[in-house]
Amino acid sequence: MNEKKLYIIKVGGNIIDDAAKLSTFLSSFAALEGKKILVHGGGKLATKMAADLSIPQQMVDGRRVTDAETLKIVTMVYAGLINKQIVASLNALESPSIGLSGADANCIIAHKRTHPSIDFGFVGDVDLINTEFMLNLLDKDLNLIIAPITQDKSGQLLNTNADTIAQEIAKAMAKDISVTLVYSFEKKGVLMDVNDDNSVIQTMDRSLFDQLKKDNAIFAGMIPKLDNAFSALETGVKKVIIGDALELNALVNGESGTAIC
């Protein structure tokens, strides 16, 4: 395996919603040495814009049902405004960056989700990551800033979960480069008690995760993130860390957050 290192960092929506926190996070991201991919969502802006336009929104298990009008909004917000704001901020910090969605150069190919009882609309599940294209850009010392909009083989845009995109890119890239996957958000890590920000579980293996799920002792919203983390480790990703976006340097150095092992 190539010994070059790659950080794939997913930043949570609550950080994107706060201009000061986002600025702090991006400064830390810019200062992080090495090859970097940042995957972002859209925070609350898409929901607010939908409300302003009187477009009803439906959520199922924390996932947005994406009808045709909602797809227009999330594409504008995620792949447009937020992506370009992040790119502009990083370039201003002299950290050369390029903004992408899955539709660019067939970056991420997906298919429309099928479900036996729920029509999620234009929600996509990932089929293929164009690693050659991404590695070529990374070799030009560009940060890749990726919005969670994908496409299918017929050119249909799809809204895809950002945590899943980060995991799928990490798994695909791990075949060519040493990958550290970081899920960064507003909490200090995976918490034993969701009401106690200091109850961070420092290391979590599969057996502990399974036990906590069985005991209903883990916040339901964290379960998909952890499922993604273990899936990444099982397919070659070197390290997965979950923790505070405002402590990015400490996270990647193993000094804070939850290490998934």
Image (cartoon, rainbow, N blue to C red):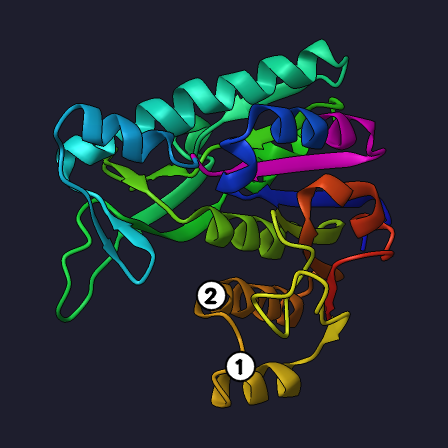
Q: Which residues are magenta?
A: 27-42
Using residue 26 as the reference point, say whether residue 120 is left or right of it.
Answer: left
Quadrant in which the C terminus is drawn: bottom right
Q: Residue at x 55, y 55 (%)?
A: 167
Where residue 187 appears, as percent x and y from the top left, is 63, 53
Where residue 185 appears, as percent x and y from the top left, is 60, 47
Using residue 206 as the reference point, say whether residue 52 is left or right of it.
Answer: left
Residue identifier under label 2: 224
Do we see residue 174 in this rendering?
no
Amino acid at dot 1:
Ala
Of residues 201 and 100, which is closer to you in this image? Answer: 201
Q: Residue at x 40, y 52 (%)?
A: 126
Q: Is residue 229 above or below residue 11?
A: below
Do we see residue 27 in this rendering?
yes
- Quadrant hosting residue 138: top right
Residue identifier under label 1: 217
Using residue 91 as the reference point, say whether residue 132 is left or right of it.
Answer: left
Q: Is residue 14 magenta?
A: no
Where residue 68 appears, as percent x and y from the top left, is 14, 35
Q: Is residue 35 magenta?
A: yes
Where residue 53 appears, as percent x and y from the top left, is 16, 24
Given this view, does label 2 or label 1 mark the residue nearer the observer? 1
Q: Residue at x 65, y 20 (%)?
A: 97
Q: Residue at x 37, y 46 (%)?
A: 160
Mark 2 Cα-neighbour bin, 10 Å: few <14, some 14–19, many ≥20:
few
Q: Earlier in the sequence, mark 2 or mark 1?
A: 1
Give the CA distance from mark 2 to mark 1.
15 Å
Quadrant in which the N terminus is drawn: bottom right
- Quadrant hosting residue 26: top right
